[in-house]
Each structure stands twice: as C-alpha cells, then as structure tokens.
Amino acid sequence: MPIVGNLNEFPLPEVLNLIGTRTGRMQLLDIPEAGVLLMDLWEGHIISLQVAGVYVEDPTEVIRKLSHVVEGGYGMFEFRLMPPEDLRGSLRLALNRVAMDLCFEVDNAIGTTRALIQANPTFVLISEHDIWLEPELQAFFNGIRGHLASGIDVKSASRIVGIEPPMAYANFNKLLQLGMVEILKTSATNGANTTNGRRAEDHSHPERDNGHTVLHDRNRRFQQDESVAEAPAENQG
C-alpha cells in the first residue's frame, strides 16, 4: 500500500521524517512550476531527485528544489516501497538532515520575504508578453493591469485583487522573472531610497530599476554520509 497525502496537511519535512529508513520511490505531484518530482530513497537517504525528468546532481540544488515545494505548501505526495535494484542514483543525503535544512531554508526565505513585503516595493509594467500564464497569475495580472502604467505597490495590489500581501508579492516576483514588470525606485524623505536592498542616491523624479529581486541564497556544503554501506549502483540502462 502506498503512503499518499496532501502537502497542505503534511509538509514535506514531516513526510521525510515519516518515511524514515524505508526504501522506495516518492512522487511529488502537482507542484507549482515543477509538475512532478521523483525521489529515490534508500535506507534513510535521498539517492536521486528528478525534476521534469531531469536528474539533479548537486546536493545544494536538491535542497533548493525541495525548498520551493515546502514554500509552495501545496501538491500531493505518494511513496511506494521498492526493491533497491529498481532504484538508481549517486547522492547520499540523509533524510533527517535534509528535513532540518528544509525547515531552516524556508524559515530564512519567509523572513526575507516578510522584510521585502514590509518595504512595500512598487512595480510598473515594462512589457506584455504574448505567453501563457498560469490561471492564478493571469487573474492577478488582469486585476492590476490598469494600475501598472503608473505603478502599484504590493499592499495596494493585495487589496485590489483580494489576496494576502505574501501571495501578491509572489505573483509580482513571477512577473518580474518573466520580464513583464520592474521595481520603481521612489525618493524617500530621508534623502535616500532603497530598492532590492541597495541604497540609492536621491532624485527629484522617480526612476525605474530593472534589477530582479533576488532572495538571499546561501551557499552551503552538504557532507555526504560515507559511513553507510554502498547504495544501489546506478542503473545505466
């Protein structure tokens, strides 16, 4: 019998702790902007992660991908026991360590996002691409489209569309990454302004900043557990 659940109710770190030392394959389904993720687990370790059919080889990137799953907070998981010979992968990431790192990364990201929301940046339209947007993002864009020419801040957008500021900020960040909006720098009363965490000179007129808002991404090295027995050899077939 597979272990199945909703990531809304059971966050990924809890699921990993639940799996423990079981050997098998976990699917993470309906993950925003990722689709399906596959993880092969062997005796308490992640030995491989696939995102959209592509293997992720760098341990730091594995944590980053899984952090997005936790931050999103929705999707489904399914774990099935499998014999070791049906698994493949060369990673050796201990599940309990990964669960702790995910909690730390998400707490860090939430704190950074809150600080950015508190700064209440203003966004302006720079280009409308003829591309498909996911329904929620399209609805958000349609709701604020008329305000983007002169600029609209995160809190105003959240009120207009009827969503919480963190969700409004997340949508702005997606539009930013797509090159559809940029952050507008405005003069502050103290003679300086701040955009994307940088101090800028005061100007009599607002000017635009097309730099992307980038959450602080710490580079961290993950020590692989070499004390365990050799994991299943990678299946070259």
Image (cartoon, rainbow, N blue to C red):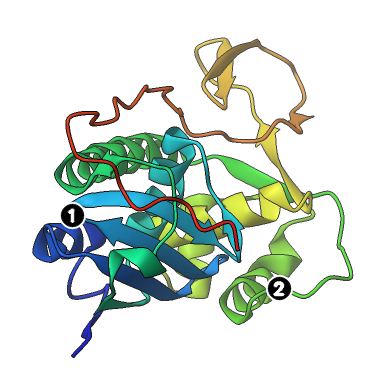
- Residue at x-position 20% and y-position 48%: 95
Q: Is residue 99 above or below residue 129?
A: above
The reply, left or right, for residue 45 in relation to residue 211 is: left
Quadrant of the rendered structure where residue 221 is?
top left
Q: Is residue 50 visible?
A: yes
Q: Give amino acid for label 1.
A: Glu
Q: Give amino acid for label 2.
A: Leu
Q: Residues within 10 Å of mark 1 (few under 14, many from 20)?
A: some
Q: Is residue 36 above or below residue 210?
A: below
| Residue assigned mark 1 | 43
The reply, left or right, for residue 133 in relation to residue 111 is: right
Front residue of 30/155: it is 30
- Residue at x-position 42% and y-position 36%: 59
Quadrant of the rendered structure where residue 192 is?
top right
Front residue of 174/101: it is 101
Q: Secondary structure at mark 2?
A: loop
Residue 128, position in %: x, y?
A: 86, 62
Labelled disc at residue 133: 2
Label 1 and label 2: CA atoms lie apart by 40 Å
Q: Is residue 149 above or below residue 216?
A: below
Q: Nearer the viewer, mark 1 or mark 2?
A: 1
Q: Is residue 165 visible?
A: no
